[in-house]
Amino acid sequence: MAEENPKPLNYIPEVILKKRKSREAWALRKKEQFQHKNFQSIKKPEDFIHEYRNQEVDLIRMKRRVKRKLPQVHSNILIIIRIQGKKDMHPKTRKVLYSLGLRSMFSAVLVKPSDGIMAKLQRVEPYVTYGYPNLKSIKELIYKKGLARMDGRKVPLTDNNVIEQELGKFGIVCIEDMVHQLYNAGPHFKEVVRFMWPFVLNKPAEGLKGSKTLFKEGGDTGNRDDLINELIDKMN
């Protein structure tokens, strides 16, 4: 019986072997990350208790703040920036933030100060900072972060036709007209604010300490007066 010739082994290039090994290592890392993430997402009962207690403490402190005299302001306009607030806030606190248009961290809105606005700021004081924006800050915010509200969509303010289409009936046809209304708290301030989405600012590399203490006491929150413009520069 004739001997069968042995079949040569299939040759696999070294490059392919290295790629295969790399893919296997990547798959193992992703699996470990997924398992670790799932493990972290499972809350223990004590986590819920701790979260609940923090929220109750937040509510008690808010009730104490509203008994104080309303803070005084010395400007026709304010900018409010949300700098705190996640799981430790009571739902009532979150509701006030939402009513101000501050639904996410580092969002900012321009408002005309009133007793109603100042009462809301007093309620959410540990989660926001505010002050008096200057002309430069308002102009740069609109040019860099301004987004128009068009049928629920966010539209960049790159075309004056968009502005004229929505605000032309008020004599506002360009960004400079918007800046004028906002900075001077003009008669169509409310219409311009409603036309825009809240500004979404960047997390500053420096300037915030993560403290709920008032700014005037060395912390982050509350009234910064004109010094708010320094923070805006870092976040814009």
Image (tube, helix red, strand yellow):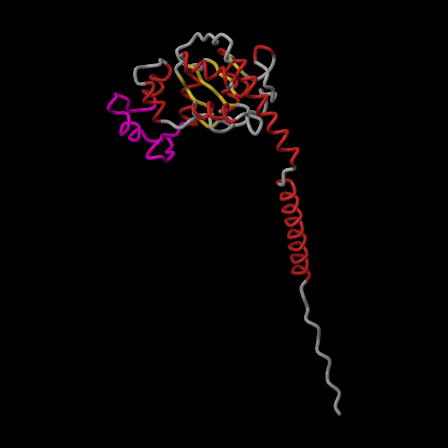
Judge by depth and name the residue closer to the eye, 130 or 159: 130
Q: Position of residue 37 (x, y in %)?
A: 63, 43
Quadrant of the frame with the N terminus: bottom right
Q: Can you say whether 73 is above or below 156 in the image?
A: above
Q: Position of residue 201 (x, y in %)?
A: 49, 26
Name the residue: 50% across, 23% down.
93
Name the residue: 60% across, 22% down.
210
Q: Position of residue 68 (x, y in %)?
A: 51, 9
Name the residue: 62% across, 44% down.
38
Judge by depth and name the residue closer to the eye, 96 or 167: 96
Q: Position of residue 7 (x, y in %)?
A: 70, 78
Question: In the displayed image of the protein, which residue is found farthest to the bottom?
Answer: 1
Judge by depth and name the residue closer to the eye, 169 or 98: 98
Question: In the displayed image of the protein, which residue is found farthest to the left?
Answer: 169
- Count of numbered labels shown in the rendering: 0
Q: Which residues are magenta?
A: 146-175
Horizontal placement of 48 versus 159: left or right?
right
**Is 156 in the magenta?**
yes
Judge by depth and name the residue closer to the eye, 49 or 123: 49
**Is 118 in the magenta?**
no
Q: Quadrant of residue 187?
A: top left
Horizontal placement of 62 versus 148: left or right?
right
Q: Can you say whether 143 is above or below 37 in the image?
A: above
